[in-house]
Image (cartoon, rainbow, N blue to C red):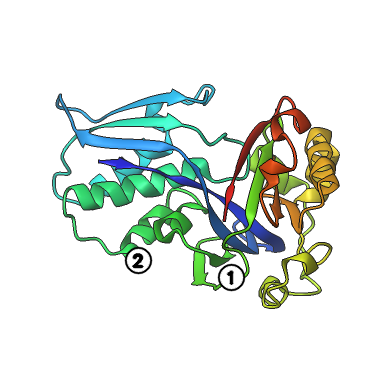
Amino acid sequence: MILFPNAKINLGLDILSRRPDGYHDIATVMVPTRWRDILEIVPARGSETTLTVTGRDLGDCPPERNLVMRAYRALAEKTDGLPPVDIYLRKVIPDGAGLGGGSADAAFTLKGLNSLFNLGFSDADLADLAATLGADCPFFVYNRPMLCTGTGTELLPIELPALPGHALLIVKPPVSVPTAAAYRGVRPALPAEPIPSILASGDIASWQGRLKNDFEPSVFAAFPEVERVYRAMLDLAPLYASMSGSGSAVYGIFEGDILSRLSPAETFAGCVVNASRL
């Protein structure tokens, strides 16, 4: 079985309050993109489950700590004798980018195993299990535009008819932003205008300056490379531009074909660049 876990972007990200457990209540809309990893799951040749990772360097993360293996173990605890598998993960989506690549890999592992072995878990069951792995993971079980609240695991489908067909340019500068460090720099507050109200207009060009990401001020201050990419993105005159999640990736939404108007590889030299359509 071959699957293609995809990245996401965040349309707005309000950090509302700090919870007694140390986590934060947030509000954001997550949207799937076409930037994808490659995940293959096959019956194991041996008696143990294995994970082989190629592609982008994941640093010092050993296979047993990878979210894919954690997803397998979490599902195995819910079943009676989950067979061993060999998992091959080709990393294309950069990590430390706010794009949810690792979370997508975990969620797609749950979905793939559920389908491969006819386990009968519903999407709601898998989303509950995914929430134990990471806040972004449940979103990728459904993999459609969602309003995400609470710690990010409370999901409500949202319609975004203005988005399909627009060009999307995502740029990750050569720096990664640890999520914990990003949260340390924020000041929770209620927004002047809730995200769903801003998106309801359907006019993407009206979002800039209204649809905000509360991580941007502190991340830009601590990682000037991210702000430079953001400013360069704005220079291209997108309908809307923002940092995704806790960074470091920045995206722009454009009318028409962005690739016909510039060479992103030259404009964003030294960065990882992906261009597609929403």
Which quadrant, please, contains the N terminus?
A: top left
Q: Position of residue 224 (x, y in %)?
A: 84, 35
- Name the secondary structure under disc 2: helix
Alpha carbons under labels 1 and 2: distance apart: 22 Å
- Name the secondary structure under disc 1: loop
Residue 232 in the figure: left or right of residue 105: right
Instruction: Name the residue carrying label 1.
Output: 160
- Residue at x-position 78% and y-position 49%: 216
Which quadrant, please, contains the C terminus?
A: bottom right
Q: Among all residues in the image, which is located at the extreme front?
A: 260
Residue 145 in the figure: left or right of residue 39: right
Label 1 CA crowd tier, 10 Å (few <14, some 14–19, many 20+):
some
Q: Position of residue 179 (x, y in %)?
A: 64, 43
Depth order, front residue of 232/189: 232
Badge 1 amino acid: Leu
Instruction: Name the residue carrying label 2.
Output: 124
Depth order, front residue of 93/177: 93
Residue 247 in the figure: left or right of residue 105: right
- Residue at x-position 79% and y-position 57%: 187
